[in-house]
Amino acid sequence: MDFATLAAQLNAGTIVPEGIVIVTILLVIVGDLIVGRSVSARWTPYLAIGGLLLAVLALYQRWDSTSPISFFGEFNADNLSVVFRGIIALSAAGTILMSIRYVEQSGTSLAEFLTILLTAVLGGMFLAGSDELVSVYVSLETLSISSYLLTGYTKRDPRSNEAALKYLLIGASSSAIFLYGASLLYGLSGGETRLSAISAGIATAGLDQSIGLVIALVFAIAGIAFKIAAVPFHQWTPDVYEGSPTPVVAFLSVGSKAAGFALAIRLLVTAFPLVTEQWQFVMTALAILSMVLGNVVALAQTSMKRLLAYSSIGQAGFIMIGLVIGTDAGYASMVFYLMIYLFMNLGAFTCIILFTLRTGTDQISEYSGLYQKDPLLTLALSICLLSLGGIPPLAGFFGKLYLFWAGWQAGAYPLVLLGLVTSVISIYYYIRVVKMMVVKEPQEMSDSVKNYPAIRWDLQGMRPLQVGLVMTLVATTIAGILSNPLFTLANNSVTQTPMLQAAQKPAVQVSKDETVRLPIAL
Amino acid sequence: MQLQYFLLIAAALFCIGIYGLITSRNAVRVLMSIELMLNAVNLNLMAFSNYLDADEIKGQVFTIFVITIAAAEAAVGLAIVLAIYRNRDTVDMEQFNLLKW
Amino acid sequence: MVSTQFPWLTTIILLPLVASLFIPLIPDKQGKTVRWYSLGVALTDLALIAYTVWNHYDFQNSGFQLVERYAWVPQLGINWSLAIDGISMPLVVLTGLVTTLSVLAAWRVDQKPRLFHFLMLMMYSAQIGVFCAQDMIQFFLMWEIELVPVYILIAIWGGPKRLYAATKFILYTAIGSIFILVAALAMAFSGDHITFDMQELGLKEYSLGFELCVYGALLIAYGVKLPIFPFHTWLPDAHGEASAPVSMVLAGVLLKMGGYALIRMNMEMLPHAHVYFAPVLAILGIVNIVYGALASFAQRNLKRRMAYSSISHMGFVLLGIASFTDLGMSGAVLQMVSHGLIAAALFFLAGVTYDRTHTLDLDEMGGLAKKMPSVFALFTIGSMASLALPGMSGFVGELAVFLGFTTSEAYNPAFKAVVILLSAVGLIVTPMYLLSMLREMFYGQEGNAVVGVSLLDAKPREFFIAACLLIPIIGIGLYPKLITQTYDVKTVQIAAHVRNAVPVVAHQHLENLPRFSFATPVFQQNELLGLVK
């Protein structure tokens, strides 16, 4: 059997985007080995970004593919996965733009950083399309282990070490718990690992109301909630965000979280249709807790990174509104919000990195009076934060509007009202930062701002940062007003995904002979 | 032998793992507890695979993957513990308080 | 319906916004070019408004005019939908005038002038957008856009307690605006089709309980802005602390957004609930009038005194809205326009005084009349207009509201008598505090802030701004038809619209009526026939 028929049988064309990422990883690491660290730092980041953009292009070509199922059901490249993989790849591209200068200044090797980051992206992209327990676990761990390494990347910084250790211990235990739930699913379904076959298997075995299924559900949710940092599985977030290198935090808060949401949708909708009410109830509770706790605790933060950590917990709560209502509009609003969130959160982190690079601190009080010294940074950070707070006409407003619109349509009035109240709370702490930067008089300027260095964009690695800053700024400003293409994309990704459309049916039809088994015939 | 016994042992092992995770002060012991949890999962998978899925033994394949990844995780974990030991001269969890816990 | 090929309203709204984006690019070191640029944009926009209203707006048409509609986010049913009618047209013109004058009034802003003018122009757009929007979400969007600029404008260029005032402002308004969004979603999703278009929402059939809930929610949202009594506490702080140009816009335009929205949504879209809430509005109106007047008396700070007087004057708008009569409605709109001009003039003059004396404390002032005779004259005219001296616009507006309320057949005589009597108290107190304010500022012994300081009289620029505001005030006062005829067809229509709802509601709850006859409108069947016609 030659390679071509094997590839055709596996339907390997679906993972060409991931293949591009893998090739990019190899090129980066081999190139770095050949030309040496100082030379490679000049071109590897651009190669990595080019690879990621190429992967996005390949994803675009795979939109609406007629045969999304590949590798005998291991991987499902439906439109939903395409969108999520695109978000993850773009978040990594944005992260690389902001990390070049940062990694240079921290005195570590850039190519290794890129390699690990791209591996994390690879894990995330596979996770977004995984349709089987083994591939879910493997891709989840690829993402997680790379994230631990990234978190501890500045290995001479004890804070980074500590963040990495905490992240690793909590992450590993949560994935062990998730895995225990997965093993229960395997057993309950009578030996099925494909997500779509699991629910059928469980129904066949007549275990659809068993306590084992509920335990499996709770354990699975624990694993997912850890990835998306939902309260009460959020404790790692502020510590890891504070201790990690800032570009890593940007990736964790956008890319890793998007992968988590992709997993959440796929796993809960496909594997747990029998206990839909239960999982929606649990996720509702998590959403409420996340919105309230994330936004309220953020009020008290003094460090910018911790502020964004809690704000990202709150944002996850908002996104979960779309998940729990379980309608087309709900899922589409999640996707839409994640796309918007990609721009605004990356923008905010780019600004923080820029400020840290110039002053070496991320205390909120140190931002006071920044407007006098650096209007562009002030503008960009203000726009991104206000967008996160949902102030119109910025992109974040439209994202939240869609979430609340979908929530109201589905009749989840209390959730929407709570979302509205907590987003007003969030406006308060976002605007506090804006106030610090814009309102303070010259004499109230903080020491860091007083000693603000001259703005030089011609240093190595600053130009990409500037490009990233301007691009996210523009996207955050106009993506809301001209949101039509994004809306269409989000809606299509949901309406053209068979898995979600099947879940819309009132009762899941399971007949005993329908459990299709693909023969393993190589 | 019945399936339940395997599941009970696995559950017990898993609980021991969680207990160790919560109570250990030494970072290496925490890592070991996590290994224990993963092994509980492996037992589960093997048992199910034997009793329910004897044709395709997907559970056994899964176990191989879990073992591999557990090794990778342990390697990364120990590397981080090593890095932290170099910086701080301790692996006591209660000493790690630079970040508000 | 006059339909134009050219999207006039969109141009009017977007011009300042787009122009504001170029402010950071203007080469300017001292902030001299920026203010000319900003003034030029504001004047252009004002000219555009005047041109559009004059050439493309039919004053005798009660419907929506200059309608523009583009699909914006069709997936959610949101349109970019603009139109003006008799209610919004005067307010759009008022916005153009007051904001342009406030840009001119901000000539002396030398601290961060770029940011200041950027925010002013942004606010300009948002305000006109609020008055023109015909889509609930678009309205909400415009409503919120103006929030952040106002916050920063107060927080940077305000008085000593500016941060507190700005934060209070944004919290009140942001929490209030939640209710708009909730009401919009609730109305859009009720019935068989989803729409955010205001006219279509007005045509939908709602159950009475639903209407009452939505009405209540909107009342809170707009009550914060207008402001209505329990939600007013942000206003004295915000108006007191903001700098003069910002106060001009705050008092002149922003308060009107609340009144406008009450008419546009609560009355036009929810007429049945309005029947129930009208007595409440009347009572709140009285509370506003009396409380505002009495509280104003107690203020020692010039701007806070004027801020409370604004609260008092907005009470008349509420009374007019609650009156169910053509005259009352007309009075409410007239009162909004007239208060917009008067409050802008007074806050501007307060700013002029502050520029010279550097205090707002009435105890510190005194004897200013000798040093600044023309400021004194202008201030006196403004105060006279504010206390409703006949021949000024304030008088006409308040008189129309009174007459409208008295002739209203929706209330029983006892209720009307109490309302009129109590608001008369407010009317008596108003001259007292305004005249005593004038006395303390301009007459008597020279105060601490005045002694030994050489004070310049009003400059031509300041004189010009005050004149631009005061001349319309007197013009309207002498010949009210000048303005009322431009919108009367619309107010008559709205009044008839809500009156039509009365028999429906009365019919539904006929048996309950006698018990609540104190507050609930009572209509005899034969009276109704006459009225509805």
Image (spheres, grey):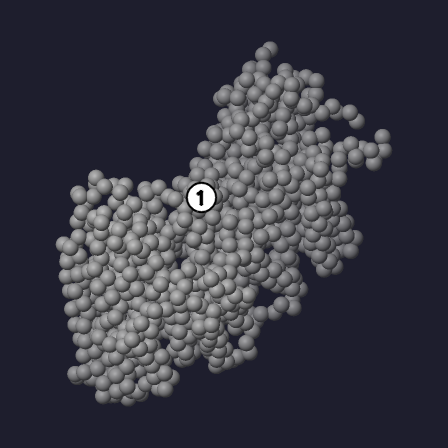
- In this rendering, is residue C450 above or below A115? below
Check disc 1 and report its element: helix, strand or loop: helix
| In this rendering, position of residue A173 left or right of residue C65 | right
**Residue nearest the observer in this picture, B69 or C483:** C483
- In this rendering, is residue A72 above or below A153? above
**Residue nearest the observer in this picture, C399 or A76:** C399
On the image, the x and y values in percent for residue C191 come to: 43, 42
Give the residue number, with chain letter if any, for mark 1: C189
User: Outermost residue toward the right?
Assistant: A2
Q: Residue at x 21, y 48 (%)?
A: C524
Residue A261 sits in quarter? top right
**Chain hosting mark 1:** C
| In this rendering, position of residue C140 left or right of residue C160 | right
Q: Note whether residue A443 is visible.
A: no
On the image, the x and y values in percent for residue C231 come to: 29, 56
Q: Residue at x 54, y 72 (%)?
A: C22
Classify the position of the C terminus of chain C by image quarter.
bottom left
Q: Note whether residue C416 is visible.
A: yes
On the image, the x and y values in percent for residue C371 come to: 25, 88
**Residue nearest the observer in this picture, C417 or A68:** C417
Q: Residue at x 61, y 43 (%)?
A: A492
**Residue nearest the observer in this picture, C314 or A9:** C314
Amino acid type at image mark 1: Phe
On the image, the x and y values in percent for residue A19 come to: 74, 43
User: Outermost residue toward the top?
Assistant: B1
Q: Residue at x 62, y 37 (%)?
A: A497
| In this rendering, position of residue C361 left or right of residue C21 | left
- Across the whole image, how many numbered discs are drawn on residues? 1
**Badge 1: residue crowd in 10 Å (few <14, some 14–19, many ≥20):** some
